Every structure is written in structure tokens, then in C-alpha cells.
Image (cartoon, grey):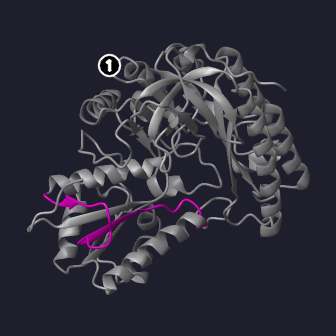
Amino acid sequence: MSQRTSHQPTVHLISLGCPRTLVDSEVYLGRLKDAGMAIVDKVEGADVAVINTCSFIQESIQESIDTVLDAIELKKQGKLKAVVVAGCLVQRFKEGLVKELPEVDGFVGVDGFGDIDAIVRSALNGEHHSLIRRRPQLPHRGQPSRVALTPSHYAYLKVSEGCLKGCRFCVIPKIKGPLASRSIDELVEEARRLIEERGVKELIVVGQDTSDYGVDLYGRPRIADLLADLGKLAGLRWIRLLYCHPSGITPQIIEAIRDIPTVCKYLDTAIEHADDDVLARMNRGITSARLRERVETLRREIPGIALRTAVIVGFPGETEQAFETLLNFIQEMRFDRLGAFQYSNEESSAAFRYPDQVEETVKQRRYDRLMQTQQRLAEEINRQWLGRSCEVMIDEPAPDDSTVFLGRTWADCPEVDGLVYVNSATPLVPGQIVPVTITDTYEYDLVAESRRTFIPHSAFRIPHST
């Protein structure tokens, strides 16, 4: 982080929500740093707090509002000079939010990359300005500076904004609009800079729906072509693909994951549900049979692939029978990683006025049952790692033991998947890829011993019993 001088305004940024927002936050910080401002690690004592918000569901809306109110309180106490709010919450609620929060000194929508420095300077001068375009101009173009908000050995590469799918529970197209992709050349150049400037070894490819990447620019999906070009970059050890809609998993994507050595045999593909009536009401564009075929094809064509998925419980009209169908599907498919959410009835979504809303107590009960089921499955799947050899990327030393280091296998994405607790008499450093043997397992995490020789991760397979 930059050091403060007597004339430099200091800025602290709080990034909320998903990795896509995190990339935007890094671009905002890059712009502010290039404008001569100092980026500081703590909000207390900074001149300005910039809060990049999320508004995907009610829980994230509340977190964003609470964070803004906390910053306003610091300003009242004289610990901040100004508060600037950016991102999805601003874009979604626009002028209504500006009126509700007069204590905030500046607002920018989801596309304020070129304006954030001017808004911050105005705020420091005691002026209140907002820049919220009704139709956001996305995505950012060229090669903007980024200030790392992740450890230096991994970074997110956002390939597109917006979405073409129109899922009825989702408000993202209302916030960010239809699909808008960045060019392959721009993305490869950005990845090259991340490798050269930060020392990035793991690149995590994100978008609202990565399976549609390139349709708007090239007339067809090009995510497999992008992966192939990224796979040629020297210094990159792992490439990981997230947020791929199951209906868009093409033979080309499967071949890219299977055949490009640096692409992890890992895929994040949200099924959302497995009951045909619920899938149709969600407008997911896929049936339970096709979901099963996708999973079976992935596992047949890419033996040992680690599959992460996400599901929603309590969507309007979800009956007990529909929920049991979902639960049975999860038990049958045995996803390696799974995230679950209780349906959030968002006012801007197509499903907001559906009459058959599910009671909150029923949602909670179904959620609890599903997560108990997945915890049991995850524990069983993890036990299959016991005694195996693999590679682990080290993320950080354990906070309370100098001989333990926290890392991940190729089957684990940062923040959302499990950890490996690596015992090593020799100090290990973040970004180092070390050979280990798995010696113990928990529900979601593994324990390992470092060793001298290793088996490449491409040779390691996870069996999937049914």
C-alpha cells in the first residue's frame, strides 16, 4: 500500500460482494492511486472511505447499508472527512438512495471507473456529487491500473459484464444490462500484466455467465479460445473457470478444461435446482435430465474433475416434492463443492410478484436439511483424498503455528472452498506450489505433510461413488 505524505489525500476502500465486485474495486483503487491519492489499509484515520457495494439479495443489501452507516458514524466522530458509495446498490436504487443518505458525500454507479477520482476530490472539497447513468457503460476498456486486494499469487480476471439468460430470481441484468464482453486481446494482455507486475500464478476467470463470453463481440461463445490463449502465458500455473451456466457447457469448454495443462480440472456451474417445474419457473433453460447429462459428460470426459455448484431453496412454488427432488439429485450427483441460498424475493426480479411464495420458516428448514446432506457428502468425498499425493498452493502461514501453512489443492477456489493445513518443518511462502501427502480429513478441509517428490495434479483423480 502507498505511504501517506503531507499533501496526499488518503483513501480506504471497502469491497463487498463477489469477486466481480472485487475486480471493480481494484480498478477504482488503481484510478485513485494514479490520481495521486494514497491507499491505506484502515478506515479509521483515512480522509475518504469508498464503499463498493453489492445488492444481489436482501442479505447483501443490508450488509451494504450497514457498512455505509458505519462509515457515516465515523465521519460524524471526525475520523473521516468524506464517504463515497459506489457499485451495485447505487446503480439499483439510484436517486432513491441519494435521497435516503444525505450524509454520503458522493455516489457512483457500477461504471464509475473513469470518474471515481473526481467524485472523491469533490467530496474532500465539501461538494456532494453523484454520477449514476441509467444505462451503465460497461465494461471498462483498455488496461486500467489495478491495486491488489488479493494475495499477490492469485487474481481474478473479469471477462464480461451483464447477462443474456434472464433468470427470474436475478436482478443483475436490471443493474448491469445485457452481456458486454471484453476482447480476448485485452484480457490476455491484462493477464500478462498481472503475472509480470504482481507475480500471479493462479488466474480465476469470472463473469456473470462465462459460458456466454464473447457472444456479443464475436457472434459465438469464445471462452474456450480465451482459456487456450491464457494457457500459453509463461509463469501461470493454474487457471480456474467460475460461473459457467450448465446449458452453455460446450464440447469446446470440456476440451479446454481437459487438455490445457494449466487449466484446473475444476468447474463452477450453478444448477440452482433440479425439479423441472421449478427450473421452468426460474427460466433456467434446462431440464433435470439435461443437468444430469451435463454432469455425467463432464465426469466421463474429464475424469476426476471437481465440480462446484450452487442451488436455491424456497423459490416460489417449490413444493415439498420439488425440494425432495432437489435433495435426491444432490445425493445422486455428489457435487464436490456446493453453496446453497434461501430464495430472496427481490423487487426488481421477474419472480417478485409470484403468488406462491414459500414461508421463511419452510425455507430455513429446507436449507438446513440440504446443508446437512451436503456436509455428509463432503465429508465422504474428502475421505477419498486420504493417503493421496497432490500439489498444494500455499496461501499464508497459519496464524498460531509456525510449522503449519494454509493452502489449497487445484480442486479448491479461494474464499469459497476448503483449505489444506500443510505441516512443514521448512518455511513455505505464499504462491509456492508444494508436493504433499494427505494425512487427515475433515468435513471440508484436509491435513497434509509436505514431501520431496510429487505427482502432478493432472495425474490425480477423485473417484465418485454413487
Q: Please identify the quadrant where the C terminus is shown.
A: top right
Q: Which residue is at the front of the view, 271 or 49?
A: 49
Residue 456, position in %: x, y?
A: 53, 15
Q: Residue 426 occupies which quadrant of the picture?
A: top left
Amino acid type at circle 1 is: Ala
Residue 390, position in %: x, y?
A: 57, 21
In the rendered view, tell whether residue 293 sits above or below residue 343.
Answer: above
Q: Which residue is at the front of the view, 223 or 259?
A: 259
Camera sees residue 131: no
In the rendered view, tell whether residue 226 sits above or below residue 420.
Answer: above
| Range drawn in magenta | 36-58
In magenta stretch: residue 49:
yes
Q: Is mark 1 on a helix, strand or loop?
A: loop
In the rendered view, tell whether residue 401 sits above or below residue 6.
Answer: above
Q: Name the residue beneath numbered marker 1.
A: 234
Residue 132, position in %: x, y?
A: 34, 65
Specify whether 383 is left or right of 34: right
Q: Residue 253 occupies which quadrant of the picture?
A: top right
Residue 371, position in %: x, y?
A: 76, 50
